[in-house]
Image (spheres, helix red, strand yellow):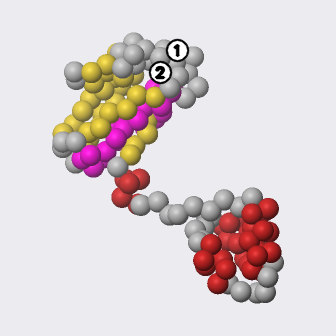
Amino acid sequence: MRVLQRLVGAAVTGIIAISPAALAACGGGGGESDKDALKNANITTERTQDPNKAALEQVIEVHDNSFSPDNVTVKAGTKVTWKWVGTSNQHSIQLTGVTSTAQSSGTFERKFDSASTFAYQCGVHGSAMSGKIVVE
């Protein structure tokens, strides 16, 4: 039970990663009951994500008549995802050479591999709803 108490305390402060071998090595008598208690407590454990992976993804929310954030700076190789959030109007993403379909929900993705500045706008609302992506 002491193992479970420590895990619950750690889970309250953030996501933890633990292997079954580490759990068994904690001792405290009755390792099997600690495993069962952990399983029954429904505590989610996961490995820490690679910080470089998070740096190569950027989400831009599409709201009614605005993008949030509208201007971003990202590293080359970053995937930018436009995500429609609570929109009642249809919007599309228009970049040089590509335009998404007009939609009021869902996502549109594009990977930016080369350093440059890319202006984009809503294909429905034009420059009144626009932004830019600076790729370094």
Between disc 2 and disc 1, the foreground one is 1
The answer to whether marks 2 and 1 mark residues whose Cβ atoms lie closer than 8 Å is: yes
Secondary structure at numbered mark 1 = loop
Q: Of the residues shown, which amino acid type is indicated by label 2?
A: Asn
Question: Which residues make up the magenta segment?
Answer: 61-84
**Which quadrant would the N terminus be assigned to in this image?**
bottom right
Secondary structure at numbered mark 2 = loop
Residue 120 position in % (x across, y down): 30, 26
Q: Is residue 76 above or below residue 102?
A: below
Residue 79 position in % (x across, y down): 34, 41
Tell me the number on the disc at residue 65. Answer: 2
Q: Residue at x 43, y 14 (%)?
A: 102
- Magenta stretch prevailing secondary structure: strand
Q: Of the residues shown, which amino acid type is indicated by label 1?
A: Asn
Q: Is residue 107 above or below residue 53?
A: above
Q: Is residue 43 magenta?
A: no
Please name whichever residue, 4 or 68, is drawn nearer the observer in this view of the structure: 4
Q: Which residue is identified by label 1?
A: 89
Residue 7 appears in which quarter of the rendering? bottom right
